[in-house]
Amino acid sequence: MPVRRMVRALLAILAGTALAIVAVPALPAMAGIWHEYPSAANRTCSDSRVYNGTAYQVCLEFNYARTQVRTVAFINPGAYTNFQVNLRLWFGGNGPDITDSCPTMTTNASRACYTAFTDLRRPYVVTEATFGIAGAWQLPVRALDMRLSAKQQERDNWCGPGAVQTTLATIGISAPPQSELAGKLQTEETLFGATMPGRIPGAINSYIAGSDWQYKWEEISVSNGQTYEAGISRIVTSLSRGRPVMVLVIPGKLPWWNASTPTLRHYVTIHGYGGVVHSDGSVHPTTFKVADPADASEHSIDVDKLLLDNANLAWNGIDTVAIVRT
């Protein structure tokens, strides 16, 4: 074969090889990597759980504007040990469903595994993390929250209108003025200018389509363990529909209030929770995320502390908690 033809044949072979390399399917995405703990941020988290001396939890972390969210899984080994985690972040209403993982690592240093930020969508967002620690898989830990639109009450006694306005805005309904809500709630017509819990469902439902989840109010008897757990379950059910829950509390007992107010009553809005998923699929929350209309702030609070220490006795002086839920 002439040299020129041999060269052309060789070039053709090389070109074909190059094309074959380009045509090879892309490798699947690699798992995430473990990082140092990120800076403090607005988070809704599960409680920290401990296995074999290693603490772990999962959080929904929001950007400053609360328009984006990501999953952050934290682990803090008590000694050199191996660990890994599988993550899931998903949205209600057929929104995105994102999975990720961080592979096995052995260290005694605190580490975090997180997803990329994604747009926060209604009606709710959930994250779940399943940790493998020292060769043993743990029960999944979970956090749920919403696209909160917290409102500050415009008068000292308008915590009810403020909390209702927060609830409607968080659902995605154009929030009516607090003056309009105060009229529907008859706040100024009641002794001491209080908002009665029984008037709240009608006010909220007047802005919601009849085919949507309707609000109701109830008293949870907290002196009985079964009814107390059932009440917590109903709060979780409402939150899992993307529907905030309002609860009446004694504000001076809230950890973030500075003054003792034993005679005052106040509404806060529960919009998220953190907890553990048991083997039967049930969720047991240990932490609630609440919005306080006093200053439109967000706070994490232990479930028992909120319901047993703060909300108990707030409504009628006996062992019951007044909630408004779907």
Image: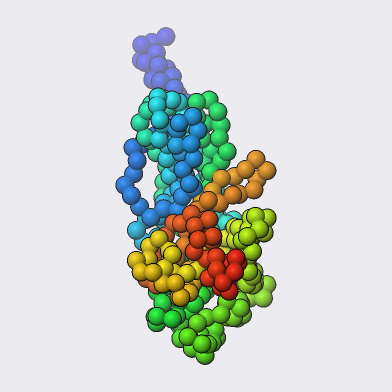
59 sits to left or right of 91: left
Q: Is residue 286 above or below residue 75?
A: below
Position of residue 237 measured from the top left corner of the image (x, y, whole percent): 62, 59
As drawn, the residue found furthest toward the bottom would be: 189
The residue depicted at 55 percent of the width and 51 percent of the height is 285
Question: What residue is at 47 percent from the left and 62 percent from the top?
Answer: 290
Q: How is the image coloured?
A: rainbow
Q: Is residue 205 left or right of residue 273?
A: right
On-image quarter of the N terminus: top left
Give the camera-side residue of 130 and 268: 268
Up-down relation of residue 285 to residue 11 (above or below): below
Q: Quadrant of the C terminus?
A: bottom right
In this picture, is 118 found above or below 54? below
Q: Would you say residue 260 is visible in this rendering? A: yes
Q: Nearer the viewer, residue 142 or 32?
A: 142
Residue 172 in sight:
no
Residue 107 picture location, percent across and down = 38, 26
Q: Going 40% across and 80% down the picture, which residue do you hit?
A: 156
- In terms of depth relative to the viewer, which is nearer, 7 or 74? 74
Image quadrant of residue 5?
top left
Q: Position of residue 316 (x, y in %)?
A: 58, 74
Q: Please tell me which residue is depicted at 44% across the width and 22% down the height of the picture.
A: 17
Quadrant location of residue 14?
Answer: top left
Q: Report the number of discs.
A: 0
Q: Position of residue 135 (x, y in %)?
A: 53, 25
